[in-house]
Image (tube, grey):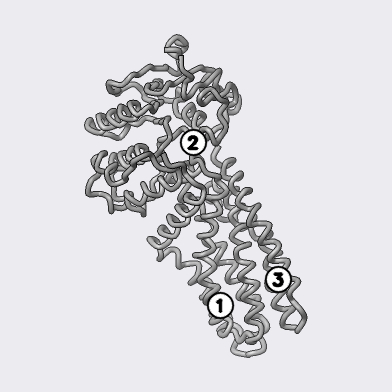
Amino acid sequence: MTVPLLAAEGLGFLRNDERIFGPLDLHVQRGEALLVEGGNGAGKTTLLRVLAGLLPATEGRILIRGQRADHDAIARNALLLGHLLGHKGELTALENLRFAMGLFGRRDGADPEAALADVGLAGHEEQPARMLSAGQRKRLALARLSLLPAPLWLLDEPFANLDLEGIALVNRLIDRHLAGDGAALITSHGAYATGAYRTRSLRLGTAVPDLAHG
Amino acid sequence: MAEPRALDALVAVIGRDLRLVWRRRGDALQPALFALLVVSLFPLALGPQQTVLARIAPGTLWVALLLASLLSLDALFRADLEDGSLEQFMLAPQPLALLVFGKVLVHWLTSSLPLLLAAPLLAELLYLPRDLLAPLLWTLLLGTPLLSLIGAVVVALTVGMRRSGMLLALLALPLYVPVLILGAGTVMVAADGLPYGGSLLLLGAGLAMLLVLAPLAAASALRIALT
């Protein structure tokens, strides 16, 4: 078995001695998606924030390509799409994407205008992000993901706020990302169907350890 | 695959913040207008005696610039915190301190530099003797970046709290006092005809130190505020 892109061993997080999730083991290989399911409050978002390095894990450890992950390794390899999308409302869609590429670097052949067209935002390039609808802002954030070089996507409820076409779009982007040797960790409260890509699932909040090992 | 370079990220942050200031230039002008107002009200309140105004001119200008800097400080990280940009800063494979430095630089460029450029005019308004203009401008040039840097650390500490404006003023003002005393005092020393190079060097040393330390401190404070 190849070394997984991301692995966690005995990972857990406690806030004021209250267990939010874990301890759990998980791993994600290149070319596959791990669907993290669980009801509201099961700790899905916290898990993603710990994996992204925004919160320090209170127990266990995170490995990237088999190496214990420090902040820099996580930052170079993982992208988080959370509830706050991180767009500047006063900047246009295109300016927001260009700024993200300055901050995170760019994927080979990344073209912000093509990426906008790809997520159905053609014609909105010069529109300030605050004039976009909630779903369109989410699409803008997806366009950002597809431009940046990190191989691991941590997607927190990527299907929320999107219409059926939008859900299909998320699945298409993930599919392409996985085909390009990327990996994804997706949280969902379970109401959406994922695409045809290779998916394993992990259920938070219930003790079904077998699923965690696929 | 193009590796993100730190310099690109710094340029991106500075460009983004300058663009944002330009997009809301009405709001961004407020601190400068406030300082102009303060300075122009003093002659009206104190009467037009040249000797009185000339005496208080350095202190008045310093206080006006200090308040203008403080006024725009509260917003330094707030908008970025609310829309998730700050989270993206922390996730980026770049030193957070460098990005913070970019933001502080833009704060200084937009809140202090315009007033610094207007300072000769304001000094004339208060009958500041012409030979004191050079020392005044030197102290402001070295001192106002210090105010932005100190302020950034304090505002980073309070960014997690709601309505931190009052707390921010309470925490920042004591730290501003030494800069103010040294800055305005240097011009007073020059007014007495004494050599003032030493105080300028002291301000410069403080600036050199905080240019390095303040972004690091502010970055750690931001990380704490967000967890």
Apparent side of residue A148 relative to residue B68 in the rendered image (left or right):
left
Q: Residues within 10 Å of mark 3 (few under 14, many from 20)?
A: some
Residue ID for mark 1:
B119
Residue ID for mark 2:
A76
Chain bearing mark 1: B
Q: Secondary structure at mark 1?
A: helix
Q: Is residue A19 positioned above or below B111 on the image?
A: above
Q: Is residue B17 positioned above or below A109 on the image?
A: below
> Which dot marks residue B146?
none
Apparent side of residue B190 relative to residue B77 in the rendered image (left or right):
right
Q: Report if the CB atoms under discs 1 and 3 are less than 8 Å apart.
A: no
Residue extending farthest right: B194
- Whole-angstrom CA distance, mark 3 to mark 2, is 43 Å
Residue B158 seen by the camera: no
Q: Give residue A195's position: percent from left, percent from top.
A: 28, 23
Task: Name the residue: 47% across, 44% down.
Answer: B4
Lower position in the chain sequence, tag 1 or tag 3: 1
